[in-house]
Amino acid sequence: MIQRIQSIYLLLAAALMATFLFCPIAQFDTPDGLYSFTAQGVSTVMAEPAAQAAEAGATIARTSVFTPTWGVFALGTIIAVLSIIAIFLYKNRPTQARICMINAFFLVTFYVVIFLSGYTFHGDLAATHTSWTAYLIMPFVALVLDVLAYKAINKDEQLVRSMDRIR
């Protein structure tokens, strides 16, 4: 049946990950300005005018710097898609449980990739301060929901096996 509790867990995990792909992950304060790190990349939020132009009284147009982070975006998309696929594997519970565990591994890897990317950009941009956002809790909640779905799938599998023994 598709109307099981693990389907709700997996749907919520997919929705959280899909939402996270469009939320800011961190902000970097640099001497050049403020940069925003999202799953799509690192872009300029606000650029500071050059010292020479500020002294001369001229204004400099804001420039938009964009560096894509395809690894973060691709991994987040894979996690969301695997959660949706697992929902529709309700007829094959062992495969559904395996996909949940693979998804949990990807979620842990996702955190590693995010923090490695963040610290790499921190160094590359010569940032003085990095502000991580509260949106970083979303993949953790998705991980918890994925583990809860795994437990519910195993509980269903044990129930089916116990019914086979009674026959």
Image (tube, helix red, strand yellow):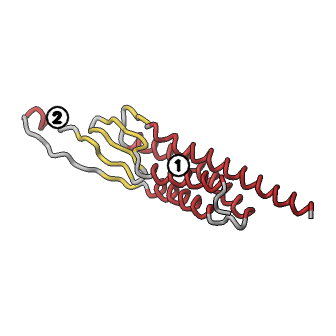
Query: Where's residue 125, x and y in %?
Result: 36, 42
Nearer to the camera, 136 or 130: 136
Q: Is residue 74 left or right of residue 43?
A: right
Nearer to the camera, 31 or 144: 144
Q: Secondary structure at mark 2?
A: helix
Indicate whether 146 appears above or below 32: below
Give the residue drawn at x 19%, y 45%: 62
Nearer to the camera, 30 or 154: 154
Looking at the rendered structure, which numbered label has been put on residue 20?
none
**Residue position marked by numbered label 2 in the rendering:** 51
Query: Where's residue 27, x and y in %?
Result: 37, 39
Q: Secondary structure at mark 1?
A: helix
Looking at the rendered structure, which numbered label has been put on residue 113?
1
Indicate whether 59 appears above or below 42: above
Q: Residue 106 falls in which quadrant of the image? A: bottom right
> In which quadrant of the rendered image does the C terminus lie?
bottom right
> Which amino acid, mark 2?
Ala
Give the residue drawn at x 88%, y 63%: 164
Indicate whether 156 appears above or below 32: below
Q: Is residue 165 left or right of residue 108?
A: right
